[in-house]
């Protein structure tokens, strides 16, 4: 495998790890209403389990309220039950046509717990990035052993992989810092 292919593969995998972290953090409730909060909610409807956004329109009514408007009114009790049974700690209010989901303010203790969770996700992502770096370096050593590249080329490529890893870890740190400040806002 040529050096550029090894580095490109590592870069792609690192990008996916960072994107996965972004998606995971997007679901963490910060006390503000966001439609992504209900992304993980699944509704049993029409004989199958479906994501909530496939059976209803989800919108932000105001900073502390989400509106869920089902396309089929007969699904209202099922949607309400799905939101209640999700472990988001939300209590939907059904008015017959629309389900309002008030987002309660976070307590100081809950904010600290969320920051710990965010840091844990960040550390897991950093471990994944380091594992990708290790895999890339092993591929480079294998290529050198099979005499496809010289020792100097391998060392230069390892430096490029390390720089790539450092860049992605800095990105993770920036994402974590932004999410932590968002959570701690009062």
Image (cartoon, rainbow, N blue to C red):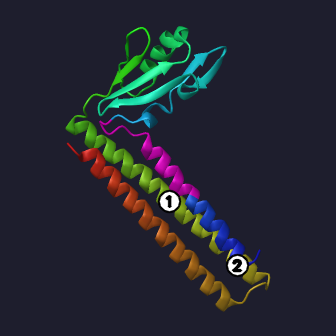
48 in magenta: no
Q: Position of residue 42 (x, y in %)?
A: 55, 25
The answer to whether marks 1 and 2 mark residues whose Cβ atoms lie closer than 8 Å is no
Q: Image height check: is 138 above or below 73?
A: below
Local SS, label 2: helix
Q: Image height check: is 153 above or below 77?
A: below
CA–CA distance in space, label 1 to label 2:
23 Å
Closer to the camera in the image, 48 or 72: 72
17 in magenta: yes
- Residues rendered magenta in the picture: 16-32
Q: Is residue 46 left or right of residue 55?
A: right
Local SS, label 1: helix
Q: Which residue is painted at 37% across and 45% down in the image?
A: 117
Q: Which residue is painted at 79% across and 86% down in the image?
A: 147
Disc marking residue 127: 1
For disc 2, the marked residue is 3
Q: Image height check: is 186 above or below 72?
A: below
- Nearer-N-terminus badge (1/2): 2
Q: Is residue 130 left or right of residue 154?
A: left
């Amino acid at each position: 495998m040529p050096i550029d292919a090894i580095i490109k593969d590592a870069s792609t995998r690192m990008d996916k790890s960072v994107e996965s972290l972004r998606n995971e953090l997007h679901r963490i409730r910060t006390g503000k209403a966001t439609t992504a909060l209900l992304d993980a909610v699944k509704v049993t409807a029409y004989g199958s389990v479906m994501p909530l956004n496939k059976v209803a329109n989800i919108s932000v009514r105001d900073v502390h309220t989400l509106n869920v408007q089902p396309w089929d009114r007969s699904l209202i009790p099922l949607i309400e039950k799905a939101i209640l049974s999700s472990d988001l700690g939300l209590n939907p209010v059904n008015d017959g046509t629309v389900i309002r989901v008030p987002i309660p303010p976070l307590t100081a203790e809950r904010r600290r717990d969320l920051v710990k969770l965010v840091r844990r996700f960040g550390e897991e992502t950093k471990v994944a990035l380091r594992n990708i770096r290790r895999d890339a370096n092993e591929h480079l050593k294998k290529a050198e052993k099979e005499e496809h590249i010289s020792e100097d080329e391998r060392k230069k490529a390892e430096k490029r992989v390390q720089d790539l890893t450092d860049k992605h870890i800095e990105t993770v740190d920036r994402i974590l810092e932004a999410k932590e400040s968002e959570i701690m806002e009062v």
